[in-house]
Image (cartoon, rainbow, N blue to C red):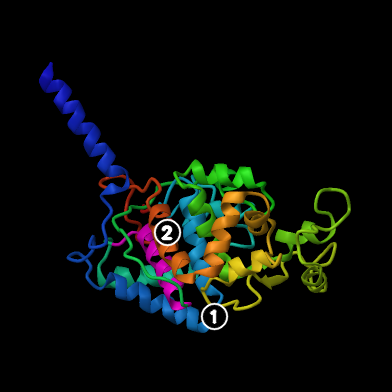
């Protein structure tokens, strides 16, 4: 009896190890020592070609981890058995960077076939994109494996939306094991990149269904936005998230919130709807180093959301489809 209880306890500890705590930065040091350099090199070329790509690759990692964990499910195309997450509301006409991931994977397959997972590629690309645009670096824990399926419904339900309420977004973070500090800190990734007119139009014209704009948005800024984001049409028109330094990873995002110039409703509510998050916004606006330190910690924490490890999943040869 005692022996069987011990065995059960050992099995439980092995299972808990397999749920993420056995990811570590040196995972490929022997099997593919050049992996990190290959990822960094391809990302650097892509960002040099198009500055916006840094934000796109960072966002891809977010949108992957919030659905089924960090398992590269977002990369899967439609197939006979898979309904792609690329067609979900948060990703359709919006998620991008897939070709860059393809290029990285192709280079890795030449160097060390079927060794480095697509999920790890995304985690590394997110870090490299942050560094390339002036943000902090961190050691990326590695050893994730790739999923055998996708979840369209999970993508529609779990990813925070720009018009979600404060409580809804916080709940979506908490369901993934992330807290209010992670919520404020990871939102700071909006210091780079663009947003589509459709993501914030309601703030300009009909914020609460009363036909009036959102008065928590600086009105001169709102007037500028209206010039290229009309009441109807222009859904895909792009706007920089941070007008002060749109391609530089810095703490201006938080300064914008204090100035009532957070582009998305989901950004500005960090300053207007909760005392605790307001304090973090003020701290990060005053101290970029503090923001950078916490961003690195929160990214590692997010990258650890229920990864597949050990013998779970697979190492895809092509990130867009499961191995046949």
Q: Is mark 1 on a helix, strand or loop?
A: loop
Residue under the image location 85 percent in, 62 percent down? 231
Examine the structure image and report whether residue 122 is included in the region drawn in magenta.
yes
Q: Name the residue under label 2.
A: 299
Q: As drawn, is 105 to the left or to the right of 245?
A: left
Residue 50 position (above or below residue 7): below
Count of marks overlaid on the render: 2
Examine the structure image and report whether residue 158 is included in the region drawn in magenta.
no
Residue 96 seen from this side: no
Q: From the image, which quarter does the N terminus lie in?
A: top left
Q: Residue 263, position in %: x, y?
A: 69, 65
Residue under the image location 89 percent in, 53 percent down? 211
Marks 2 and 1, how far apart at CA: 23 Å
Residue 215 or 25: which is nearer the viewer? Answer: 215
Prevailing secondary structure class for the magenta stretch in the rendered image: helix
Residue sitting at the far right:
211
């Amino acid at each position: 009896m005692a022996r069987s209880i011990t065995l059960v306890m050992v099995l439980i500890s092995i299972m808990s190890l397999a749920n993420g705590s056995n990811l570590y930065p040196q995972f490929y040091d022997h099997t593919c020592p050049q992996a990190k350099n290959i990822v960094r090199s391809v990302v650097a070329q892509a960002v040099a070609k198009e500055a916006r790509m840094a934000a796109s690759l960072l966002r891809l990692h977010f949108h992957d981890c919030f659905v089924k964990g960090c398992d590269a499910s977002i990369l899967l195309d439609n197939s006979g058995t898979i309904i792609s997450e690329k067609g979900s509301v948060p990703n359709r006409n919006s998620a991008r960077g897939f070709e860059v991931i393809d290029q990285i994977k192709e280079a890795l397959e030449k160097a060390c076939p079927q060794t480095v997972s697509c999920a790890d590629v995304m985690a590394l690309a997110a870090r490299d994109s942050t560094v390339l645009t002036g943000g902090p670096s961190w050691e990326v824990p590695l050893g994730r494996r790739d999923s055998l399926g996708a979840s369209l419904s999970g993508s529609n339900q779990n990813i925070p939306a720009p018009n979600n309420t404060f409580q809804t977004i916080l709940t979506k973070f908490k369901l993934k094991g992330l807290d209010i500090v992670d919520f404020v800190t990871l939102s700071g990734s909006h210091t780079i990149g663009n947003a589509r007119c459709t993501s914030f139009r309601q703030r300009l014209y009909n914020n609460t269904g009363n036909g009036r704009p959102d008065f928590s948005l600086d009105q001169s800024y709102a007037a500028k936005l209206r010039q290229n984001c009309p009441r109807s049409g222009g859904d895909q028109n792009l706007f920089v998230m941070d007008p002060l330094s749109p391609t530089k990873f810095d703490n201006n995002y938080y300064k914008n919130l204090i100035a009532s110039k957070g582009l998305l409703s989901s950004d500005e509510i960090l300053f207007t709807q909760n005392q605790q998050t307001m304090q973090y916004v003020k701290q990060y606006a005053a101290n970029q180093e503090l923001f950078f330190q916490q961003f690195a910690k929160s990214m590692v924490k997010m990258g650890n959301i229920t990864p597949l490890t050990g013998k779970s999943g697979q190492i895809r040869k092509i990130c867009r489809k499961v191995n046949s």
